[in-house]
Image (cartoon, helix red, strand yellow):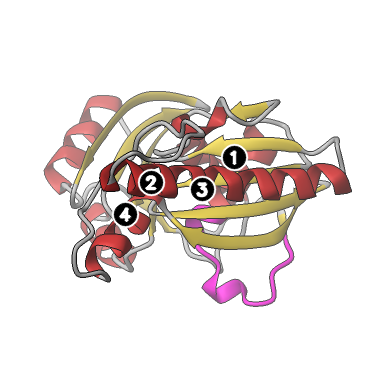
Amino acid sequence: MRNLIVDEGNTLCKIAVLDKSEVLCEASAPDFDLAKAAELVEQFSVDKAVVASTRGGAEQICEQLRSKIDRVLHFSSQTEVPIEIEYSSRQTLGADRIAVAVGVVCEMGIRDALIVDMGSAITYDIVEDGVFKGGNISLGVAMRFRALNEFTASLPLCEATEPNNKFGQSTKEAIEQGVMQGILHEIEGYVERISAENNKKSIIFCGGDAESFVNRIKSAIFAPRKLMFTGLNRILEYNVSQNNI
């Protein structure tokens, strides 16, 4: 069963074709490309799709896909999922956070974890005994650099680098290491707290900026980029099994 997965994030719209847990093909662009999606649907004989968006464009993408695919699931915070969610404002819970948690529990088989997802924002989410318990949201790497540039009169716009535990010898270095080391210490604080509460919890890193930090955290597991795709695929198959689409 080959499925089309569409993940419209804050900066890129990523699409992939999955056969069970295997990613057969993936592509990305600033916006959803119906022609590319149609090409993949035909090439891989796709008959189902799931669409998630953090921009609010999921329903429009679903309407476009329904001209190519019979069954299309608009994944929102209200969609049924194969794990329990304990969150007081479920309607505001990001679909990406749910999908990654499903990927961790259902694909990786990890039922107790701190999930550090480093995208446009950094999210710290807790899973206990397979239940999503909630988490915190912080500024992402690029967002922090932009804030220093846009909300000051003279600080330059800098980019991510490796955190090196040194103090900057120029304004550029001071900004770079201030941001990167600040994030590292933030992560270390969460990991230390969670490990003190339950040292059997796995520390899962994912997202585009994770590679800069994962090797700095003892015993951290770097989840492949496909974790979002496999989580969404699990949610799609679960809703098919429940006759929801």
Label 3, label 2: how far apart the Cα atoms are: 36 Å
Label 1, label 4: how far apart the Cα atoms are: 30 Å
Closest to the observer, 205 or 142: 142
Mark 2 and mark 4 lie on one chain; the one further toward the N terminus is 2
| Mark identifier at residue 49 | 2
Q: Position of residue 167 (x, y in %)?
A: 44, 40
Q: Give yes or no for contact between labels 2 and 4 (Cβ–Cβ under 8 Å).
A: no
Q: Is residue 245 among the parts visible in the rendering?
A: no
Which residue lies under the disc numbered 1?
Answer: 103
Question: Residue 136 lies in magenta, yes or no?
Answer: no
Q: Position of residue 26 (x, y in %)?
A: 30, 30
Which residue lies under the disc numbered 4?
Answer: 145
Q: Nearer the viewer, mark 3 or mark 1?
A: 3
The residue under label 3 is which amino acid type? Ile
Mark 3 and mark 2 lie on one chain; the one further toward the N terminus is 2
Q: Is residue 12 left or right of residue 221?
A: left
Q: Nearer the viewer, mark 3 or mark 2?
A: 3
Which residue lies under the disc numbered 3?
Answer: 183
Q: Is residue 98 left or right of residue 16?
A: right
Residue at x 52%, y 27% (from the top left corner)? 21
